[in-house]
Image: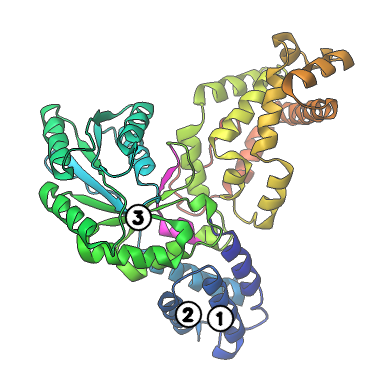
Amino acid sequence: MFENLTDRLSGSLRKISGQARLTDDNIKATLREVRKALLEADVALPVVKAFIESVRKRAVGQEVRRSLTPGQVFVKVVQQELERVMGDGSEALNLSTQPPAVIMMAGLQGAGKTTTVAKLARQLKEREKKSVMVVSADVYRPAAIKQLETLAGEVEVEFHPSSADQDPVAIAEGAIDAARKKHLDVVIVDTAGRLHVDEDMMSEIRRLHQAVNPIETLFVVDAMTGQDAANTAKAFNDALALTGVVLTKTDGDARGGAALSVRHITGKPIKFLGVGEKSDALEPFHPDRVASRILGMGDVLSLIEDAERKLDQKKAEKLTKKIKKGKSFDLEDFRDQLQQMKNMGGVGGLLDKLPGMGQMAEVAQQQVNDKSMGQMEAIICSMTPKERRYPDTINNSRKRRIATGSGTQIQDVNRLLKQHKQMAKMMKKFSKKGAMANMMRGMGGMMPPGGGGGGMPPFGRM
């Protein structure tokens, strides 16, 4: 999400060196670069001005300790200010009310409200163990109600039926009444997309808000609209009294201006980020972790949480035991590892959260991206069970058959077999006594002090 900003800031922050003290003179050029980087990221001008002034005031006069370089001191100041601009901490949903807790979604057309409703319902069901009902009060967009019904089926939550000839208030009240009778915990109300300048539509959503009195009113906005996202959120907040913001399509936005502008302009916290199209692609917003990612420091805690939630622990334990017993790492195991990596968001999703990767993440993605991973999986699926278990039996005629079956070339099959061989060698090394423990000790040093993530997960689980 912050690729452009990360590259610009990394370059400008490296320029401060060889000073014993940070002064107006030696940070002036760097602040100018930071200002430019923020403006290019489409951060709102008032936010940029306030941010630069705050960084300047805090940085000037700071002594540089022996253990730190001036650049490190300045980066620390910038990081703390980024966190402050985006919010003091992660703000969870407030569901402490007589059930059902009502969550209302508002926003412009095309911002991704309906898919966000499904993502949020899944998250509440799986992570918070809540029983959830969703309902569509969008009586204007063709097939909006059917779309939500389909998504509700996919994430396995209750769906309250409605139709285009009903009044939105009657729809929402009917859903809440039905949820109460079924003793459900949460009702999420999807509303029609509307412009803040459309007085009739804004009047309707105010009437709906007043009738259902939601405990959470979330504004769903497309991150790719940059600072406009913050300005639109402010206009809606003036009419609706929002409790938070959900930024969608952050995986397609390389600038990140919206995330840095929303809190400052609206005074409302960003509660979630939509990071992809799948129903599990919704992340709680953590200002400290996002600030780390902007500055190229990675986000190890989120990586660990993803691993704990998305990886198949049984398969991982099985592989670990198999390798420890000295058995070979076959192509079935290799396919499982590819699928696990896909579940974690692919190579890009992993590297983006690792500290100090910077441009290496982009280079790695060019070499091994989601498309090439899909191709490797297709090649393995075109093999017989015996070929997957005993890769050495794959001769030239078999390679031709496998390439034809997977729609690839023989050189693609050769490349996959070579990569598998390299990984099998690596696994063999880890199976030797002490090698795994030594590697884990080395990885343990990557964790920030007091990280609270329970340490890095074992290699087998990664």
Q: Which residue is mark 1?
A: 31
- Residue at left offset 41%, top offset 79%: 50
Q: Please indicate whether residue 121 sits to the left or right of residue 274 in the image.
A: left
Q: Residues within 10 Å of mark 1 (few under 14, many from 20)?
A: some
Q: Quadrant of residue 327?
A: top right
Q: Which residue is mark 3?
A: 108
Span of residues in magenta: 280-291
Q: Is residue 284 magenta?
A: yes
Colour logic: rainbow
Q: Please indicate whether residue 365 sits to the left or right of residue 288 in the image.
A: right
Q: Which residue is mark 2?
A: 52
* Amino acid type, residue under disc 1 in the picture: Leu
Q: Position of residue 99 (x, y in %)?
A: 14, 38
Residue 101 numbered tag: none
From mark 2 to mark 3, how far is it between C-alphas?
31 Å
Q: Residue furthest bottom?
A: 25
Q: Is residue 314 above or below residue 98?
A: above
Q: Position of residue 383 (x, y in %)?
A: 73, 15
Q: Position of residue 43 (x, y in %)?
A: 47, 70
Q: Residues within 10 Å of mark 2 (few under 14, many from 20)?
A: some
| Element marked by disc 2 | helix
